[in-house]
Image: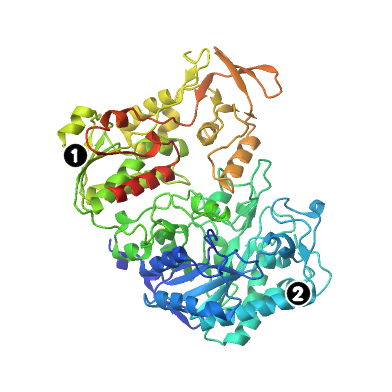
Amino acid sequence: MDGHIKFKKLLEPGYIGSVKTKNRLVRAGANPGFPGDYDDGYLQPYYYNFYEALAQGGIGLLTIGASPIGAPPGKGYRLDDDKYIPGLHKFTDTIHQYHCPVFMQMFHIGPWMPGEFSAAASTLTEAEMPITTQSLPNAHSLTIPEIKNVVRKFGEMAERAHQAGFDGVEINAGCTHLFSTFLSRAWNRRQDEYGPQSIVNRTRIVVEVIREIRRRNGRDFAIVALLNAVEPGLENGITQAEGLEIAQAFEAAGADAIIPRVEFFNTHKATGKKDSTHFPDVALYPEAPAYAAANSVDIKHHGVGGWVPLAAALKKTVQIPVITVGRLDAQTGEEILKQGHADFISLNRRLIADHDYPDKIFAGKFEDIAPCTACQTCFNDGEAGNFVRCRINAAAFKEKEYALKPAAPGKKVVVIGGGPAGMEAARVAALRGHKVTLIEKEPDVGGAMNLAAVIKGSDREDLPGMIDYLKTQIVKAGVDILLGHEADRKLVESFQPDAVVVAIGGIHDIPRIPGIEKSNVLTGQALHHQLQNYLNLTGVRIMTKLAAHYISIGKSIIIIGGHIQGCQTAEFLVKRGRQVTIVETGPEIGAGFMPFQIKPQLIDWLDKKDVPMLTGVTIESVTDHGLNIIDKSDQRQTLEADAVLTALPLLPNRELYNQLKDVVPEVHCIGDCRQPGLIIDAIADGSRIAREI
């Protein structure tokens, strides 16, 4: 079906204040982080290029990530001096040429500021903190003159933004930044007119900011307010009733639109750097907390549209547009608009995965959309101060550097291996004009992603969709695919290639432990072969639903390996009724996970499911009934279970590469066979090498 027919509501123009949008898909001001050299305070070229690509891709409204108020140099681009106006005006002129209005997000991260810059509504001791890792104890409590100074700075920055050509601003009063410490009773312990005694007092600082921005810029300059409209899991956090009142106060002050978010708070016993999240797919992972449904959260679709009930409630409360967020896509967005639950649909991660998402949706090019699998790499990279990466889009934040350039001359390229690294290398090489043949030993492509899809399932991470996308794209790019053939020197030579790319994946690590050959042991290699046989019969989508029925493994299992592989295997088994123990020889459970959200969520869930997680273990032997170990206290133990399963990181596999190095001058080894890693590493490797051939 053509996108113009399927997405009529999304295609309608809209208004935020006096600012007109060409459609109802917008990008709210998600901050992609501030890596690299920001000492000069200017918007860096890689973000400039990223935002231009989003505007070119058809988004109705673009909001660029926050310019922080009160931050020391090096913490982002700045607009606290007139000298920054010309450079940003050049940027807004570029965005406007795509008929796309552009807003700037503004925020003050408050208690997260370093050292003397740390500020909050109230100074709390460590004992008074409602969530121990969510805000810094002893942050400076702003005095009233300091509050007035913050209000003035917001007004001045918004005025400069207007002069620089921005059409409006988005005020971030969410997360656990400065403004939320005033809005939420959990953090606000003041006894003055900015205290928690009433909604009027709690909203006063944001209301004053909105009024100051309006006073300086007039009615033609749009103001969007983002807030935590409910804070589940936080003692004395914002309730839904309070969130609706806060939004009404913002509307009365002059806001032109509201972005309501749910900020979930989960206190983790596991080591982690985030106890709250506004990502519904993360908040509801691995399972929805018991209190979720009672807090305006839709738990039916594993996070997709999870915050929509809150937006719908707010839509009945305010007269200004409501922008809804949270793991949305065009199909869900169209239904939200049809039902009158919101006025605009905000996307972020999907636009990182595919900058042209809006244009492809409206053109009906659904099979060409690079899928976001909600892996959270982009968020984690930004939080860590690193350059943002995307699992499926290796060109994200490298738009100019990775612009496809025609190969000169075109070559005959053989790619060996149909996993993510091989498919991406084949796709990019073919698009550049090379004649590409991909050889895969299995009956279908996908490689280790097929096994990962079975273990992970498709509830939160749609790996089957990613496999389908890559397969479709290599076919459309003209790649010749040879399935069911294991490549060797003779077969490769028969193609007379100019270049060979070896992407056959890693090899399984089978630990050298006495008894590892026993019948109650299922190694990662054996599990892979077992599942691969079933995959060949059923296909990956069916196998993700039926996997539990095909794995004969007993009721109690010991998993050797506590890295990402072991933890996700444990999740898979626990959800299917098995009793699991994780044994790790190293010091850490969860190595390989992104640390900020997914890792603490999963490890805490495993802990609550009574999964023992032992670290620093020496494994002495496998017995007929489990393992003999020496724990980190040097005590011998016997762990009993029906089965022992190994789930260890892969090892490099360079044998074929070494055999082929003298076939042609240009032979490359990529992905897990070069250096085992995650899917994102394999895609990045394939994309990089295909641009070098």
Residue 252 can be seen in this image = no
| Amino acid beneath label 2 | Glu
Residue linked to disc 1? 497
Residue at 37 percent across and 47 percent down: it is 466
| Quadrant in which residue 416 is drawn | top left
Does residue 469 lie above or below 47 as drawn?
above
140 relative to 515 in the view: left or right: right
| Amino acid beneath label 1 | Pro
Residue linked to disc 2? 146
Percent across and percent down for residue 587 are: 63, 32
Of marks 1 and 2, the one in the foreground:
1
Give the structural element (helix, strand or loop) at label 1: loop
Give the structural element (helix, strand or loop) at label 2: helix
Distance of label 1 from label 2 (alpha carbons): 69 Å
Percent across and percent down for residue 139 are: 76, 61
Percent across and percent down for residue 306 are: 53, 56
Does residue 446 lie above or below 334 as drawn?
above
Does residue 239 lie above or below 223 as drawn?
above
| Quadrant in which residue 219 is drawn | bottom right
Percent across and percent down for residue 178 are: 69, 66
